[in-house]
Amino acid sequence: MAIAGGLPEQPLRFRLRALPPLAAPGDAGNVRLMRPGAAIDLLTHRALVVKLKVEGPEPAKGELPPVLNLQLESSSRMYRDYYVDLDFRGEREIVLPESDDGRMLAEFRPAAANYKFKHAGYCFDYGRILALNVRWMRCDEKRQVRCTLLAVEALAEKPAVLKNPVISGDGWRFRIPAGLRPDDYAEFDGRGEIGIFDADGKRLAGVKPVNPVPSVGAAESQLSVTADEPATVRMSVWLMGKPLLVPRAPGKESPPAEDRSADGRK
């Protein structure tokens, strides 16, 4: 993970979430999705793997590639979107570890006539999946591309605990002395304890850092995460810039505060 420089030097602030280990494509515990049937339970199969074949002209230099959307639909008519950038040609198998509501909001917000965007970002019941919807989200009519879906599987999640994750930078290490279950996350604002939270944001514990809090922001740096055993995580780092000074408009000086006694008289 790259951290840009040029900002005031400041303590490391982060959120680190543990993602569940996934079964390999083709595993007997996976769920094949391209089969019609009743509602299925994907509470422990939230990651998808798609095998597809892409044919046609490649995007011109500087052009954005076509995007395919694999969308899970629940019995309550809520949605989760998984996006595949078709920036390759030929046959490929792609793992999509989680849905991407951030990209849905920024790039592919649904038309209000179809459904409200909050239906693709609010609470979602993976326990009753009714449909897998497939649609184009971006395509070039002049450069038509043919995409063939060969298979879509929901990958089984394996129970595991992310133990003692360590964030490393340029010459420093910052260890989180805790275990994170899948979807738990650790959050640190640069001071005090490291908070440990569950998937719903409930605080589970607070642990004291065992290493000095590193500084970031002044120079570009690369961050990495390791743990007692190989694992997959998602980490966000937030940096603060210089204070924004808003000049006061001419003639808009604030009147002096009035000195009032306790009974309200001047």
Image: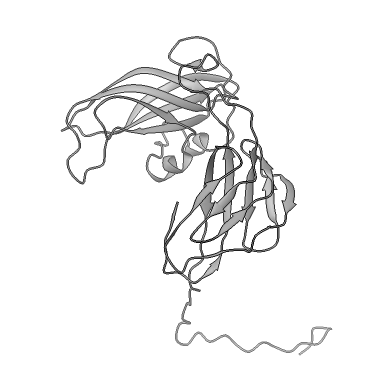
Name the image quarter holding residue 66.
Answer: top left
29 on left or right of 62: right
Q: How many marks?
A: 0
Q: Residue at x 61, y 41 (%)?
A: 228
Residue 129 screen position, x and y as percent: 54, 20
**Looking at the image, which residue is at 73% across and 89% down?**
259
Q: Residue 87 location in percent, x, y? A: 27, 35
**Left or right position of 19 against 147:** right
Whole-percent x and y of residue 242?
A: 48, 73
Residue that sits furthest to the right in the current view: 263
Residue sitting at x 76%, y 90%: 266
Check the image and tell me how it is coloured: one colour
Vertical comparison of 161 with 22: above or below: below
**Apparent side of residue 242 relative to residue 134 in the rendered image (left or right):** right
Which image quadrant for residue 34?
A: top left
Q: Quadrant of residue 56?
A: top left
Residue 130, percent from left and from top: 52, 18
Q: In the image, is residue 199 above or below residue 256?
A: above
Q: Nearer the viewer, residue 189 or 264?
A: 189
